[in-house]
Image (spheres, rainbow, N blue to C red):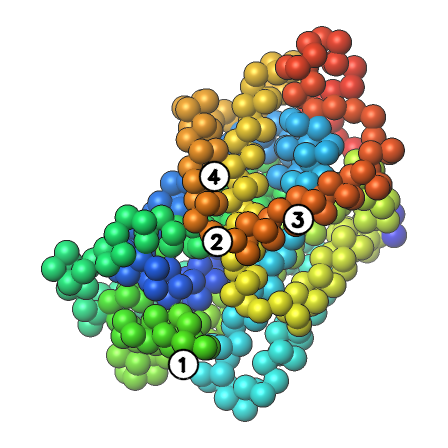
Amino acid sequence: MVSGDLDRSLGLYQTMMISMGAMIGSGIFVLPALGYKKAGPAVIVAYVLAGLVVLPAALSKAEMATAMPESGGTYLYIDRAMGPLFGTIAGIGAWFSLVFKSSFALVGLGAYLVIFAEPLSGSLMLVALGLGAAVVVLNISGTELSGKVQAVIVSLVVVGLAVYTLNAGLVADWARFTPEEGFATHGPGGVVTAAAFVFVSYAGVTKVASIAEEVEDPGRNLPRAILGSLAIMTLIYVAVVAAVVGLGDPEVLKHGGPDDGASLTPMADGAEALFGGFGAIIISVIAVVALTSMANAGVLSSSRFPLAMSRDSLLPAGLQTIDRRFKTPRNAILLTGAVLLLLIRFVPVVDLAKLASAFQILVFSIINVALITFREANLASYNPEFRSPGYPYVQVFGLLAGLGLLTQMGTVPILGAAGIITGGLVVYLAYGRSRTDRTGAIGKILHGEAASDNVVDPAETD
């Protein structure tokens, strides 16, 4: 095994499918009932609101990805903009949040698995752990193979969702979406709170930036994949969640889960009316495939964070090792897989979702600050092929809106995010600080040309 460059083997379609695969999962198959419990039928508005808050970060990342088409994504941009301390915190946080989401997907599929494979109900944990291990092996076996598998799975799931939505249009109770039936049963506050909890549904939209080093023609394909997948998924979320609300029993959606909580199988709850009475089974099969796909995309993307941080001497050098045979970051994938399996085994599924969403909101807010920093530093080497429209107003809106949603998450998720920030600070002080002697683009803003010698060139590739 050697350290070196990764293969540029992902075209536009595969890149978009990886992005969509990281979003087609819990956001559709698990979270709608949680959102419904907080907002009623107006949960569809919550999904649109969450998408609007994500858009500025998507535009910002699309721009920075074309200026720095390397592995690392969120970590790389924040590090190069604001320095290694903030980069370490953002890298570890973004890595954890995406692994949280992948774990959530693998645990969440258990509830659907029982519907058509009840004999497995006593060993759901083992099934989830087995699927997690399989995802890790697939990712080590090659990005191109993983990308092709992802493209096929996501394409089939999208077709299944389209059939589900069209059939629901014929039998669903659409009167629930009228003011007379209590469309916004919890008012605007409920919509905002629901938007905060379903925000993690969109986390995958920018994660393809973390595998930019493996994307063909990144200046063209990355912006199209990021913005295209966001637009498509917003439409899919609204259509599918509307079908879920129109088909399901409101009381089952709100109280059909463990301990009188929200249902963990909202798409299957009202699906018996579809597909000749086999709706619940068909939807459950699609859910298992989709949630596995999301976990695969999550491991593929998140494993590139420790790879990039290792290249910058913020984590041990062994994490940047590239497998000689498969050309994948084997050690980074193994570390990610180990954390994934531990989370599946020991952390409750709802807590996984809340923690993932809270830190994603924070990271998406900061990424807008990173773009502003690059623009205002006016570095000659910062030359993106795509530029975010509406600068800087779009980025300021993304920052303020994200922080506003974060206040709706509750105490535990906010404390979890604070814990990850503290952990990142400790890692930097204990390991990275003594091994790095540089500043981000912000150094030029604060100290002028005198800091230029220590500013890392955004276009530099290791």
Question: Which is more foreground, mark 2 or mark 4?
Answer: 2
Relative vertical location of residue 260 with respect to residue 52 in this rendering, above or below: below
Q: Residue at x 44, y 33 (%)?
A: 400
Residue hosting label 4:
403
Crowding near the residue tagged with mark 4, few <14, some 14–19, many ≥20 C-alpha atoms within 10 Å: some
Q: Earlier in the sequence, mark 4 or mark 3?
A: 4
Instruction: Estimate the x, y position of residue 47 in percent, counting from the top left.
Output: 36, 51
Q: Can you tell which mark lies on residue 281?
A: 1
Give the residue at the far front of this rendering. Answer: 411
Between marks 4 and 3, how big is the CA–CA gap?
17 Å
Relative vertical location of residue 261 with respect to residue 422 in this rendering, above or below: below
Instruction: Estimate the x, y position of residue 267 in percent, counting from the top left.
Output: 37, 70
Q: Can you tell which mark lies on residue 410?
A: 2
Between marks 2 and 3, how big is the CA–CA gap?
16 Å
Residue 245 lies in what quarter of the image? bottom left
In the rendered structure, the answer to whether residue 6 lies left or right of residue 233 reads right
